Structures are given as C-alpha cells and as structure tokens.
Amino acid sequence: MAQLGRLASLRVTRIATPGVFLDGGDLGEILMPGRYVPRGTLPGEAFIVFVHLDSEDRIVATTETPHIQVGEFAPLRVVSINARIGAFLDWGLTKDLLLPMREQSRRVNVGDWVIVHAFVDEKSRRIVATTRLNRHFSREPARYKEGQPVNILVYGETELGFKCVVENAHDGLLYRNELATPPAIGEKLTAYIRTVRADNKIDLRLDRAGYHRILPLSEKILAELTARGGRLLYSDKTPPEDIRETFGVSKKAFKQAIGALFKDRRIVIEDHGIRLPDTSLIIKPDTASPKKKIAAPK
C-alpha cells in the first residue's frame, strides 16, 4: 500500500504521455514521470518507488532512493537556505527536503550536517524535516532485552555521554566513561542494551554484556598472562581509559572478567596487577606494558 514519504511496491495500471500511473490504493493513481520509466514497461509490472510530492504538491512516484523516509531519523546535509522559509536538505531526490525555521532547534548553515526526523506536516500535508527529535521518539514501551544488539544513530552529546536513536524509535545513551574514543555525531553503530529505564529511555554499551562478553575476555586475559610471564599490570584499580585502550572494553567488563577468573582460582589479584597462581612454568619472564594494544574480544 502506498504511503506518502515511504517506499512501496506499486503496479502499473496504465500508460500515459507523461509517464505511467501506478495503483496507489487509498492515494489513488500515482504518476511516475517518464524519465523514471524503463523502455517497454507494460501494465501490471511492479516497481519499488518512493511516494512524495512534486514542486506543484502533486503526489508522484520516483525510482530514486531517498536517504530518509517518513518516520525515520538520519544525518542530512544542508544545501541551501531561504531566510523566510527555512533550510533545504539533500535527501537523495531532485527536490530537496525542507527543514522549516520552526523545526530548527538551532539555526543551521549551508554545508552543515544535521540529524533530522522526517514527518508529514498535518497542516500543509508536505514532507518536512525537524531537528527537534524528542517529540518524535516512540511512546510505545521499549521492549528490549539486556544484552540485545541494536542499531543506533548518535545524535547529540551531554556531560554524561552521547545521545542515540535506538532502532529508529527510542532514545538511548552511551556513557562517556565507558568509551575508549567518543563517537562522531551522525555515526551509525551496533550497540547492546544495558537497561531500559522507567522513563522508556535506554542505557547502552558498545561491548556485549554478561557471559558472552566475559568468557572471551577471560580467555584473552589468560592468554596474555601466559605470553607475558604470568603477570599483567592491570587490576581493578587501573584507570578506565587504560583498560579501554588496551582491551577494548569498559572497566566494568574487565572487573567482571578478572572476578570470574579469581573465583575459579585461575588468577591471583594483587594491588597493582594480576598474575597466574603458578608462574614457574611460564617461559617468558617479561610483564605487559599498559601501553600495548590488545585486540578486543569478539
């Protein structure tokens, strides 16, 4: 079924001089202009098209693929500005997407990349963009499980960390003190659910939680201990940034891993590091330097 601002598979109902008409269901017949119609197209053929408005506000279809659809969040570039109306964004179509002045949380300039949400304006019935994202997050309960992988889009920054759109629907946060390097605004990543809060906002992490994270990290720590003479200069007192730089995980993940190893009596935890219980069988006598990068566990 055709929806304004969305991709759809629509069938040709008839051929006309300006192009072909497609069955748009409740939207009626929709013109796909001739420049998008392959030679030899016949009634009954189906096309994946994007339904939008042309410069005269008529509903039309295009085979061009937009960078954003209605209901989605995405980073788009400002290509021009009209001081009376707003900014225009490159969204992959011939006609640019309007970011009205009233929908700008801050004034933008040509060349800026902005994170926007696309929606159909109730008054004008036109597809527009907004940088006022909070009002467009889903009000449906966030039904995610702890440790579940999710797709995120980084859209802002606070003192605590980086604000993210989770699965194109919910508001989430990556905590700054758990990150090795800050993500870029507009970056798309895979993250993992840490917890869903009572206000429907989501705490995220970039490394897996629980058993799936601890087991490979534990084995990597043991392997590194063996390679380094049975001793490592890392403990639960090591700064989080040193642990993240070396192991590619948060300090909490590292503490969980060495805690599990200690409980199984596979390591000894000391004031300034960890060691194997018996180092007499280890050939290499050197210890690890905190500056050496160790590949993060998969």
Image (tube, rainbow, N blue to C red):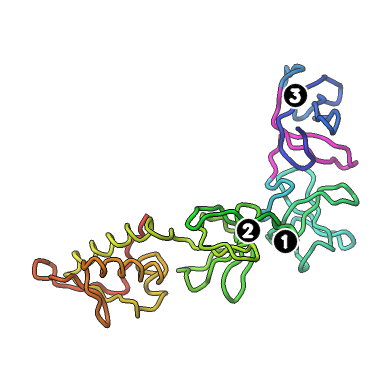
Rendered position, 28 above or below 295:
above
Q: Is residue 230 left or right of residue 294?
A: left
Task: Tell me which corner region of the image, top left, top right, bottom left or bottom right, holds residue 32.
Answer: top right
Mark 2: give few (<14), some (14-19) or many (20+) Cα within 10 Å: many
Q: Which residues are magenta?
A: 46-66
Mark 1: give few (<14), some (14-19) or many (20+) Cα within 10 Å: some
Q: Which mark is residue 165?
A: 2
Q: 92 or 264, which is in the foreground?
A: 264
Q: Which mark is residue 185?
A: none
* Amino acid beneath label 2: Val
Comes first in the chain, label 2 or label 1: 1
What x and y, as percent, mark residue 281?
A: 9, 66
User: Does dot 3 land on a helix, a strand or a loop?
Assistant: strand
What x and y, as percent, mark residue 63?
A: 72, 33
Q: 57 or 247, which is in the foreground?
A: 247
- Please state, as top left, top right, bottom left or bottom right, where the N terminus lies in the image: top right
Question: Do the numbered discs 3 and 1 sit on residues whose CB atoms are within 8 Å?
Answer: no
* Amino acid beneath label 1: Leu
Asked if the stretch drawn in magenta spans residue 52, the answer is yes
User: Does dot 2 land on a helix, a strand or a loop?
Assistant: strand
User: What is the CA distance from the residue labelled 3 to the residue labelled 2?
Assistant: 34 Å
Q: 149 or 85, which is in the foreground?
A: 149
Q: Which mark is residue 11?
A: 3
